[in-house]
Image (cartoon, coloured by chain):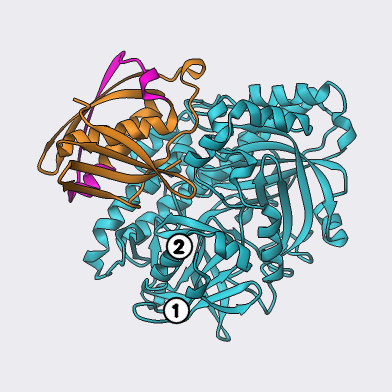
């Protein structure tokens, strides 16, 4: 779980999120951590509550967008932040679990809310070093 | 951006002639300095938009254009349904009908001398929900949600948030016709249920501003603007509902385009024919989101009025005008000598009807539509008037803001939020925000020179300058 690393890449007005991992699922987990990091330090989020997330899509790139958008939705309606993710992918179906806690303005100091994951720079690919999963998120 | 990719038509107009898959040329309005600052992606996206079915005239971009999602931000494109034209969720954006409204106080800036300025800043920050995780005081039932989605700002006024006079000063008189609440998903409704009357975050704000300069005395007088008077500007949008509708239809259209025989240069241009079930489905939902944004700004206005009634009760707070930036509107425009009904997408661009336009309220009609341009916390904002007339350009559109000069990532490396707040306070600008990091990402230096953007818009004949506003209080999400 959460094996790999995440990073942000520049986009004019918004934020690019990129996950790297040994598997496609691990790269998706890291991309979700990058999404949280656009809002606050993922390390500051306690794993108090787990939320189950299921989604599917027509291809693996749209599956990444669907996964990140499902995380955005849960953040928005539960007023939560998530600091840990576990993803299992079966074909083009994803089952995920996100651990987090309600937003604490004093401790998390959230910078910005995420509106959604876009199809811009959307890419899921396997290279010599493992899997990469990325897109631009609208903030 | 490489200027060599463009043919220079004038000091402020650049063109890519129609070639390859392009159905129309691409036309960019900006000075050479602004073009040079833009990302190369603006060129790519404008050329891609020019290849979409049913596009009319040109693929346009405004002086504040930057890299967007399929369409550039600052992009304007009109499509004719009768010629296979499309509607695009990416051409409207996630924050549907995000926009700005400006209220007139009738007070001189001296009214904020002394401790009242700090009191007002604190009261606005305390009373208007802003930032991540914030909720409003209104919690909509399913029935009220439907009424809001159909009624827009008119719904809000009926519920006591404002006056009928406000509606005269909002595009489409505060209510987008053709909204279909039934097209709005349960998830979009769920996201909005507790978010009415909230500001959001990022570049959204409520500001108390001073009219620092009047550029056009006659227009300023017609708009009710006088030098050294205070105004209040509000920038926010359709909140979670609009974001969710954008998300859902972007994915749906990405899958549907091939089924309609539309070959997309990039699938982020996701679109569907206007006269198709997907196209009509999106338009009905998008117009409901427009109404959500208009209702939201109306409620935030009401909250601001409540604060002023306590802190500065002599303020009038009459609505000057309300503009939306991310929309697709059905409008009639002259194209090669004939009037045509077009679906005009403006993604990060402002409708800018010129003098005499019948959709403007009578008091504003001789002058043209107020075009409200948000700048940054440090550099101020502008009020323009639509140019229009026979020389109407880009389907009567103008810029919408300064446009970012650098990414949020770069801004964070360059500034600390606390230092930005202290520096602005030393200049007399009080900033209130729940997030230091949010302030750093929105630092004035992260934005382009709004004066240069507005100057280019004026010289390009898109709109003319009326007044410059400098911020005194900024409440950020």
Q: Is residue B396 visible?
A: yes
Spot occupied by residue B424 in the image (x, y as percentages of width and height): 72, 33
**What segment carries the magenta color?**
A41-65
Residue visible at 71% across and 66% down?
B458
Q: Is residue B324 magenta?
A: no
Give the quarter of the image for residue A27. top left
Q: Nearer the viewer, residue B282 or A132?
A: A132
Q: Which residue is mark 1?
A: B24
Colour seen for chain A: orange
Residue drawn at point x = 53 percent, y = 33 percent: B196
Mark-to-mark CA distance, 1 and 2: 19 Å
Taking the spot 77% from the left edge, 38% from the top edge, the residue there is B317
Structural crowding at the residue carrying mark 2, measured as other residues with C-alpha within 10 Å and reported as few (<14), some (14–19) or many (≥20)? some
Look at the picture and state if B319 lies above or below A101. Answer: below
Using the image as rendered, state which of residue B88 and residue B122 is in the foreground: B122
Please tell me the numbered disc located at residue B40.
2
Which chain is rendered cyan in the image? Answer: B
| Residue B134 drawn at (x, y percent) | 51, 25
> Pointer 2 indicates a residue of which chain?
B
Label 1 sits on a secondary structure element that is loop
Direction from residue B345 to residue B155 in the image, left or right: right
Q: Which of the 4 image quadrants contains residue B242?
A: top left
């Amino acid at each position: 779980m959460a094996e790999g690393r995440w990073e942000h890449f520049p986009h004019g007005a918004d934020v690019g999120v990129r996950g790297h991992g040994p598997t496609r699922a691990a790269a998706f987990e890291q991309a979700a951590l990058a999404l949280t990091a656009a809002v606050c330090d993922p390390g500051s989020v306690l794993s108090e509550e787990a939320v189950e997330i299921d989604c599917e899509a027509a291809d693996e790139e749209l599956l990444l967008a669907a996964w990140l958008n499902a995380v955005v939705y849960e953040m928005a309606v539960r007023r939560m932040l998530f600091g840990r993710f576990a993803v299992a992918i079966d074909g083009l179906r994803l089952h995920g679990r996100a651990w987090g806690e309600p937003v604490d303005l004093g401790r998390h100091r959230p910078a910005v809310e995420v509106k959604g994951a876009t199809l811009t720079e959307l890419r899921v690919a396997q290279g010599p070093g493992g899997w990469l999963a990325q897109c631009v998120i609208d903030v | 951006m490489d200027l060599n990719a463009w043919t220079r038509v004038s000091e402020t107009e650049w063109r890519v002639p129609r070639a390859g898959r392009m159905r129309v040329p691409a036309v960019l309005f900006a000075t050479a300095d602004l073009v040079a600052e833009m990302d190369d992606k603006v060129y790519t996206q404008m050329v891609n938009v020019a290849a979409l079915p049913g596009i009319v005239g040109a693929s346009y971009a405004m002086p504040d254009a930057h890299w967007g999602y399929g369409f550039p931000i600052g992009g304007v494109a009109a499509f004719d349904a009768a010629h296979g034209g499309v509607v695009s969720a990416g051409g409207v954006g996630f924050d549907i009908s995000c926009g700005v409204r400006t209220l007139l106080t009738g007070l001189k800036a001296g009214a904020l001398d002394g401790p009242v300025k700090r009191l007002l800043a604190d009261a606005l920050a305390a009373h208007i929900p802003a930032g991540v995780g914030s909720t409003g005081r209104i919690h909509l039932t399913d029935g009220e949600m439907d009424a809001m989605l159909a009624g827009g700002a008119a719904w809000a006024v009926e519920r006591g948030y404002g006056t009928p006079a406000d509606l005269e000063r909002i595009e489409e008189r505060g209510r987008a016709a053709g909204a279909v609440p039934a097209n709005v998903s349960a998830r979009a409704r769920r996201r909005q249920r507790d978010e009415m009357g909230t500001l959001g975050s990022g570049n959204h704000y409520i500001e108390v501003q001073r009219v620092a300069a009047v550029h056009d005395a006659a227009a300023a007088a017609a708009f009710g603007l006088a030098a050294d008077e205070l105004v209040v500007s509000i920038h926010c949008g359709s909140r979670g509902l609009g974001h969710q509708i954008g998300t859902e239809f972007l994915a749906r259209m990405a899958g549907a385009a091939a089924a309609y025989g539309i070959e997309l240069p990039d699938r982020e241009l996701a679109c569907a024919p206007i006269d198709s079930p997907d196209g009509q489905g999106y338009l009905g939902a998008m117009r409901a989101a427009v109404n959500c944004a208009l209702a939201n700004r109306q409620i935030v206005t009401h909250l601001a009025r409540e604060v002023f009634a306590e802190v500065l009760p002599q303020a009038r707070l009459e609505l000057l005008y309300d503009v939306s930036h991310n929309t697709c509107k059905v409008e009639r425009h002259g194209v090669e000598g004939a009037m045509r009904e077009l679906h005009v997408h403006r993604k990060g661009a402002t409708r800018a009807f010129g003098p005499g336009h019948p959709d403007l309220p009578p008091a504003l009609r001789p002058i043209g539509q107020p075009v409200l341009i948000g700048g940054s916390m440090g550099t101020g904002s502008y009020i323009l008037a639509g140019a229009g007339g026979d020389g109407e350009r880009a389907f009567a559109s103008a810029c919408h803001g300064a446009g970012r000069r650098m990414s949020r990532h770069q801004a964070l490396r360059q500034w600390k939020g606390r230092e930005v707040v202290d520096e602005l306070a030393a200049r007399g600008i009080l900033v209130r925000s729940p997030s230091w990091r949010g302030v750093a990402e929105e630092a004035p230096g992260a934005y382009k020179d709004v004066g240069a953007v507005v100057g280019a818009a004026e010289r390009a004949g898109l709109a003319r300058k009326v007044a410059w506003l400098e911020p005194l209080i900024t409440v950020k999400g």
